[in-house]
Image (cartoon, helix red, strand yellow):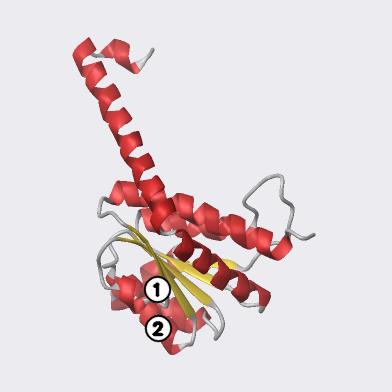
Amino acid sequence: MPLESKKPPKQAEAWRLLVHEHILQSAELAQRTAEMSLDSILGAARLITKCFQQSNKVLICGNGGSAADAQHMAAEFVNRLSGDFERPGLPAIALTTDTSFLTAYANDFGYEGVFERQVATLGNRGDVLLAISTSGNSRNVIKAVAAARKTRLTTIGLLGEGGPLTDLVDHAVVVQSRDTQHVQECLLTIEHSICRVVERALFGAK
């Protein structure tokens, strides 16, 4: 049974307007990002392409929706983005997936260091750390970036507007909004765009 039929007509219309407004706002932010951040998106893709060309790997971290994005993006690299574009897997690891480590470290030392420890342990010079934060304020992501810089990893931030991470990473891609929902929606498009450019830069000629 359609959702509208269960509620009075006025409420159903209000919901329609709510959804319509949300989609339009998300689309407007995506359009602004395409106009304002295209160069920084392509710059991130170039850094990741260079990382893979040199037989290095990408580590990805974030919290909440950004943790889901980290896993999503790692899956696109290791598997593939498009079903019609065959290529080898690319080495990428989401630092959000090992629940035994995450819970052990958080229980013993606190949650702020869960990404920092993995970067210090798994990261090698020439790798890339991709730090995702809609606020730019995530303390555990900030500590991961600091650890990456010590280990000579290149750091890329996929970020919302504001927060210290913009200035802490080597390369920032910033969505000019502080609305978490819309920033997350826009970042997913950016992540897919980066994966698309990287796989075609590496394997498109073949």
Q: Mark 1 points at which residue?
A: 115
Please tell me whether mark 2 sits on a helix, a strand or a loop: helix
Q: How would you rate the neighbour count of disc 1 (Cα within 10 Å): few for under 14, some for 14-19, many for 20 or more?
A: many
Location of residue 89 (image quadrant): bottom right
Residue depicted at x 35% and y 56%: 64
Whole-Å distance between the Cαs marked 1 and 2?
Answer: 9 Å
Task: Pick whichever, 107 or 173, lies toward us.
Answer: 173
Q: In which quarter of the image is the C terminus?
A: bottom right
Q: Name the residue under label 2.
A: 147
Mark 1 and 2 residues: CB-CB less than 8 Å, in contact?
yes
Q: Where is residue 56 in the image (x, y as percent from the top left)?
A: 62, 77
Q: Reply above or below: 43 against 55.
A: above
Residue depicted at x 69% and y 65%: 202
Q: How would you rate the neighbour count of disc 2 (Cα within 10 Å): few for under 14, some for 14-19, many for 20 or more?
A: many
Please tell me whether mark 1 sits on a helix, a strand or a loop: helix
| Sequence order check, earlier mark of 1 and 2 | 1
Q: Residue lying at the far right in this picture: please name it.
A: 206
Task: Pick whichever, 128 or 96, lies toward us.
Answer: 128
Q: In which quarter of the image is the N terminus?
A: top left
Residue depicted at x 54% and y 86%: 125
Q: Position of residue 98 (x, y in %)?
A: 47, 65
Which mark is nearer the camera, 1 or 2? Answer: 2
